[in-house]
Image: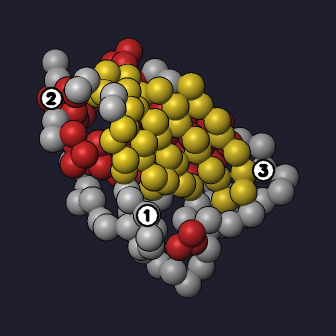
């Protein structure tokens, strides 16, 4: 089963990839390695209140943000590669959580993205990962995730 078929089976629709807001690329393909810039969650609409995990939103709510960030990453992979079957392996994720200083559930939050990668890519979606807490994120995101992916040429 292809990653696109898995997405369809899961009832997931990839979001539209937007252009970066700055002097950088959304992705860089260098040989067999695809580097994806950090993606936040499209669920975040209201810029008035910055959601701090552990204060305004729970770890479970933030996990949904990580899932949405993962969908953004997969959508970017599709734009970069043309088809998701070119993904040989998701190599590494770096998950950043905009959390209160006493929050300890970073791993559980970023699992929202990690679980999605395995659901969509199977064993090729298993990856190395870091999950860290940060004091703030661009555009007031609760979660931002970047990825490194090995691809077929």
- Sequence-first disc among 1 and 2: 2
Q: Tell me if residue 64 can be seen.
A: no
Q: In this view, does 32 lie to the left or right of 136?
A: left
| Residue extending furthest toward the bottom | 48
The colour scheme applied to this rendered structure is secondary structure
Q: Where is residue 22 in the image (x, y as percent from the top left)?
A: 44, 73
Q: What number is the disc on residue 103?
A: 3
Q: Residue at horizontal 59%, vertical 79%? A: 49
- Sequence-first disc among 1 and 3: 1
| Front one among 55 and 89 | 89
Q: What number is the disc on residue 5?
A: 2
Q: Position of residue 72 (x, y in %)?
A: 35, 51
Rendering quarter of residue 21: bottom left
Q: How packed is label 2: few (under 14 Cα within 10 Å), some, or many (20 or more)? A: few
The reply to whether the C-beta atoms of the residues labelled 3 and 2 are less than 8 Å apart is no
Q: Residue at horizontal 72%, vertical 51%? A: 133
| Residue extending furthest toward the top | 123
- Sequence-first disc among 3 and 2: 2
Residue 2, placed above or below residue 140: above
Q: Marks 1 and 2, Cα distance to the nearest angstrom?
A: 31 Å
């Amino acid at each position: 089963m292809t990653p696109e078929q898995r997405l369809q089976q899961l009832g997931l629709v990839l979001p539209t990839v937007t252009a970066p807001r700055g002097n950088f690329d959304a992705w860089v393909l260098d040989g067999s390695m695809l580097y994806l810039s950090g993606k936040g969650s499209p669920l975040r609409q209201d810029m008035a209140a910055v959601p701090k995990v552990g204060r305004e939103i729970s770890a479970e709510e933030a996990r949904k943000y990580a899932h949405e960030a993962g969908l953004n990453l997969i959508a970017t992979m599709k734009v970069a590669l043309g088809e998701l079957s070119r993904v040989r392996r998701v190599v590494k994720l770096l998950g950043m959580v905009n959390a209160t200083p006493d929050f300890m559930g970073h791993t559980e939050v970023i699992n929202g993205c990690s679980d999605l990668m395995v659901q969509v890519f199977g064993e090729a979606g298993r990856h190395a990962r870091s999950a860290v807490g940060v004091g703030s994120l661009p555009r007031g995101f609760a979660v931002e995730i970047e990825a490194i992916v090995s691809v077929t040429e």
